[in-house]
Image (spheres, rainbow, N blue to C red):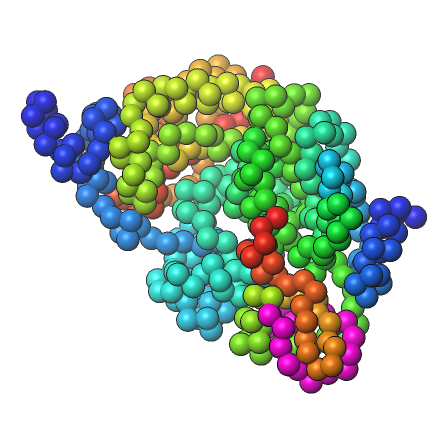
Amino acid sequence: MDINRELALEILSEFGIHHIEDCEYYLIELEKTKIYTYSRSKLNFFKYEKFIKSKGIPFLKIVKGNTMLLPGIIHIVQIEDEITLTNKQAHDFSYGKSMEIIGEDGIYMVRDTYKRKIGIAQISDSILIPLIDQGWYLREGA
Amino acid sequence: MNRKQLKSLQLKYGVEASLLTNFIDSFGLVETEKIMSMKPSDLKRTVRVNLMKVTREQAIQRLKQEKIIAKEIPEPPEGLEILKGWEKVGSSQTYLAGEIMPQGLGSMLAVHALDPRPGDRVLDMAAAPGGKTCFIGERIRNSGLIVANDKSTSRLSSLISNLSRHSIDPVIIMNLDAGQLRNMEFDRILLDAPCTGEGLVVSQPSRRKSKGIQNSYTMQNVQINLLRRALSLLKVGGIMVYSTCSLSFIENEQVLLSSLVSVEILDTGIISGNPGNSDIHQSFELSKRLLPSKLACDGFFITKIRRLQ
């Protein structure tokens, strides 16, 4: 059992996410921040641990008890329900905007017309609310 | 050239005196004037296509949908020139999806020369903001290991976001003075060394006045130390690329000269560009110097070496 994967899944369940890809998971602890990362390769590297800022791609960050999804989650999350947005909708979604949409309430993988995964969203009362989108880093930094 | 003529050119192009003299001594008056008379808009704007996600043709089509017109460039095989819509590139869905990365020709060609292969252990010694690191990851097809180091903590955020967008995951990101790296061994190393950046005199005209030849000598010490450290981390027979965005012999050939006894200079595999200065050492004819006046790109220097002992 990958303990980091289990710990991450426990936290991700708060966002309605219950399945992530089977790969290598790491936990990086930096002062008051915990970062969960993934890689499809085993990153066995034991030198200079205290200077290591990330192993693979970060997908979950906890700062002083506040949990936030990072765009890396889009690459590893497994969600059955999907929704495809038009170009205009995809553009707005990538800027973190909510929008009216027809669909059942639930958690969705969001794709654009090229079938690219562009984020994860929740539909609630016909409003699509981004949980995380591919444009997040541009707005928020790392 | 007498002092009066030099002063006149200095005023005409707004260049620091020692920088101008060094350019003229290195490339001649005609080439120097060509470079100094260029405007930022004279440079080609280029992006690299992430071939793990799309082909160049697909990228061109997807960009076209977003009203961005691009065409293929001769090298590297991932490169595109943006002909129209450059201002939209950074907010395009194609960019956000990690299918393209704005990147200068020199940066692309440095990784192209390094030629990392799947399974390689690669060190990127000064990795932020991560454009070259992503390219390395794409070339190793996410199979192997990249140690991406950068001394600057503040620049790591852009490195992480670029890796995330491009889905490059066999990466360990380190925040260390590269001179402190020890007891590791790599198949390939990219040392895109810190430099005065005087190859950027066209795209960033403020550099014409901010840097003089004394800055090049100061950087040379840093570069020599980093080069020696890099070679100690490279396995015997391993490949390294030394590159800078400086055109100066002081920051390039003269830096490499200090380590020639333990390395072999190799052909970069790059078609475009001028050879290095073979007057300093004959083997530098295999190096490449990209002049803005010849290639409409930022100035860049690239040398590929193999460690012998």
In magenta stretch: residue A112: yes
Tell me where residue B166 appears, x and y as whole percent: 60, 54
Question: Vertically, is B103 above or below A93?
Answer: above
| Residue drawn at (79%, 63%) of the image | A15
| Residue drawn at (78%, 68%) of the image | A79
In magenta stretch: residue B282: no
Left or right of residue B250, residue B128 in this image? right
Question: Would you identify the image quadrant in which residue B118 lies?
Answer: top right
Comparing B148 with A126, the one in front is A126
SS majority, magenta: loop
Question: Would you identify the image quadrant in which residue B231 lies?
Answer: top right
Left or right of residue B245, residue A113 in this image? right
Question: Vertically, is B213 above or below A88?
Answer: above
**Screen quadrant of the N terminus of chain B:** top left
Comparing B108 with A113, the one in front is A113
| Residue drawn at (50%, 69%) of the image | B62
Tell me where residue A50 appears, x and y as whole percent: 72, 29
Q: Find the magenta span and give its range.
A: A97-116
Comparing A18 with B85, the one in front is A18
| Residue drawn at (84%, 61%) of the image | A13
